[in-house]
Amino acid sequence: MDEDCTVYKTVDLISKKWTLLIILELFRGEKDRKRYSEIKRSIPRITPKILSERLKELAEENVLRKEIDYSEIPIKTFYSLTERGKDLVQVVQSVKKWGLKWKFENEDCSGTYCEKCEL
């Protein structure tokens, strides 16, 4: 496959381990932005090194926004989805729909929208 192919480039971005789960985690819940520790707590099997790398990569790709609040000590860093990142949530939803249709039976999951999902 040609490396200039749009599918190749897109898959290269989103197929890295944990990427879609990070996007989902930033989408889920009531808050528009989350701290590193909140993301880490919600994805317990991800290592701190990989989480930091993925957050940096996604910020460089303008999928998420990194905001630093210098008004308090300690300084706080927040992450939130950009419009580009919010569009990728549709990919996560499509993965979910495919899994429910072809692979997994999960009544709890099938009845929820991922933003409200507490699983």
Image (tube, rainbow, N blue to C red):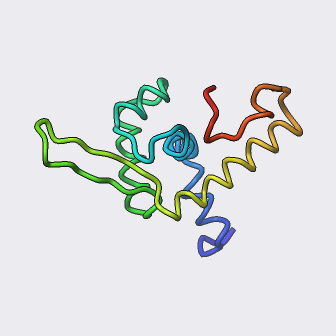
- 42 or 57: which is nearer to us? 42
Residue 117 appears in which quarter of the rendering? top right
Pick the front one: 117 or 2: 117
Q: How many marks?
A: 0
Would you place residue 106 above or below residue 64 in this image?
above
Query: Where does the N terminus fall, quadrant-wise?
Result: bottom right
In the image, what residue occupies the spot 88% across and 39% down? Answer: 101
Residue in view at x 77 percent, y 25 percent: 108
Residue name at image x 80 percent, y 44 percent: 97
Residue 34 or residue 11, whichever sits in front? 34
Above or below — where is 117 with respect to 57? above
Residue 102 in percent (x, y) is at 88, 38
In the image: residue 57, left or right of residue 4: left
* Residue at the extreme front of the image, as rendered: 30
Question: Residue furthest toward the left?
Answer: 73
Residue plotted at (75% across, 50% down): 94
Residue at the limit of the structure toward the bottom, as seen here: 4
Q: Quadrant of the C terminus?
A: top right
Q: Residue 10's spot in the image, x, y percent?
A: 60, 63
Left or right placement of residue 96 versus residue 30 in this view: right
Q: From the top left corner, tell me how far across and down residue 4 is, in percent.
A: 60, 75
